[in-house]
Image (tube, rainbow, N blue to C red):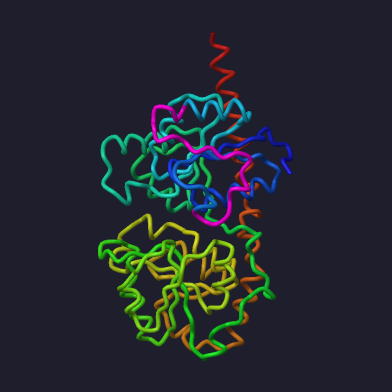
């Protein structure tokens, strides 16, 4: 529970529909006994992921009018006795407004995506990004290497935490819950990809050419996109099935029937993009959660190092290591995943976030006291 915590009530804020990271962190904090509130735009967690609303003690849909946002958030702070605000980015605009509002509680900036890596930003958006990275009470980054790349752009604050997209322990599949392997029926190796895909040639999520190559190697391919679209160019690939989008918890069990989960992006683009090379998205942890080994693209530094150092799988391009893997060797990797993966659950890691919160809260109180004593 909340041992020695000065924080009880936390407000998650997102200037969009809540992402899965927001939901997973909130669920882990709730398991520790905290009261978690949500203020967001667009869709609710239930509408996007098929679950999540019940995690929050209150959910507030922020208005489209930008002039009322801070007023409403202040009302939530007062009525719910909020001790800390955790803002999740993309976009950064509302986070910058919260930081500049000089609120009585700390504002944590959680950078899911560094927008300067992805888009040509306007001067205004650049200013928002700078404010969030340089002036928040505390900052959270996915990985240290990702943070180091951001530091080439801005003077980052000392109060920061690296906190990856760990999986929720509640969704962890036990071996008895695994679906029967399709490979045992047809003697083919089945690979699965979950998440966003694109057919735009300039998009790093266009993985058509890589999937074609895997198909030519004889692999059976399965894609579970985050959106239900036609994806005509993907459906033309031999041995590939585009499945319907599934609720998160059902998806985890569904993918357990496949042999490997692939973490891959457009090979012509990804190696040049720091936000891809050094990032660590949800899908790799989701594969581990489902008990299936990972095939990590060679150019994805963080995912590759994680996969190899933990013996959770192989480098995707090194086909000889897994293409004709023996059943004994495969089972050893799965056993290793089941033995080690609990340390990568959100619940096993969340105390680091709690400690971070309390340190930031303590420093905020000291600053307020110091400023008050001057008068």
Query: Image point 60% across, 45% down: which residue?
Result: 353
Image: 178 above or below 194: below
Which quarter of the rendering shows the N terminus?
A: top right
Residue 10 on image: x %, y %: 60, 37
Query: Image point 47% across, 58% down: which residue?
Result: 280
Of residues 373 and 361, the one nearer the viewer is: 361
Magenta stretch: includes residue 58: yes
Residue 113 on image: x %, y %: 41, 49
Give the quarter of the image for residue 364. Answer: top right
Q: Which residues are magenta?
A: 48-70
Image: 238 above or below 292: below
Image: 311 above or below 21: below
Which quarter of the rendering shows the C terminus?
A: top right
Query: Image point 45% across, 76% down: which residue?
Result: 222
Residue 150 on image: x %, y %: 38, 46
Of residues 19 and 286, the one nearer the viewer is: 19
148 relative position to 13: left or right: left
Magenta stretch: includes residue 30: no
Query: Image point 59% across, 25% down: which residue?
Result: 78
């Amino acid at each position: 529970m909340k041992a020695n915590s000065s924080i009880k009530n936390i407000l998650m804020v997102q200037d969009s529909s809540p992402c899965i990271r927001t939901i997973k962190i909130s669920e882990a904090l709730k398991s520790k006994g905290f009261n978690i509130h949500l203020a967001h735009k667009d869709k609710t967690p239930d509408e996007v992921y098929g679950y999540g609303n019940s995690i929050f003690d209150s959910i507030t849909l922020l208005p489209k009018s930008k002039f009322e946002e801070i007023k409403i958030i202040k009302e939530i702070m007062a009525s719910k006795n909020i001790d800390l605000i955790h803002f999740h980015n993309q976009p950064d605009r509302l986070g910058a407004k919260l930081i500049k509002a000089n609120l009585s509680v700390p504002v944590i900036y959680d950078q899911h995506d560094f927008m300067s890596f992805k888009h040509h930003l306007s001067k205004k958006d650049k200013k928002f990004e700078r404010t969030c990275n340089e002036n928040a009470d505390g900052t959270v980054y996915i990985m240290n290497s990702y943070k180091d790349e951001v530091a080439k752009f801005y003077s980052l604050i000392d109060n920061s935490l690296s906190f990856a997209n760990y999986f929720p322990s509640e969704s962890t599949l036990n071996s008895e819950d695994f679906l029967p392997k399709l490979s045992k029926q047809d003697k083919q190796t089945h690979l699965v990809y979950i998440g966003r895909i694109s057919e735009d040639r300039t998009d790093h999520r266009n993985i058509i050419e890589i999937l074609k190559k895997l198909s030519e190697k004889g692999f059976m391919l399965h894609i579970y996109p985050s959106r239900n679209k036609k994806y005509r160019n993907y459906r033309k690939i031999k041995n590939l099935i585009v499945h319907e989008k599934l609720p998160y918890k059902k998806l985890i069990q569904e993918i357990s029937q496949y042999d490997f989960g692939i973490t891959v992006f457009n090979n012509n683009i990804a190696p040049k993009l720091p936000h891809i090379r050094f990032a660590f998205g949800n899908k790799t942890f989701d594969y581990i959660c489902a008990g299936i080994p990972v095939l990590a693209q060679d150019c994805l530094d963080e995912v590759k190092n994680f996969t190899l150092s933990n013996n959770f799988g192989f480098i995707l391009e090194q086909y000889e290591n897994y293409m004709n893997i023996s059943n004994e060797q495969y089972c050893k990797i799965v056993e290793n995943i089941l033995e080690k993966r609990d340390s990568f659950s959100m619940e096993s890691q969340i105390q680091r976030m709690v400690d971070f919160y309390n340190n930031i809260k303590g420093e905020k109180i000291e600053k307020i006291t110091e400023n008050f004593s001057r008068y």
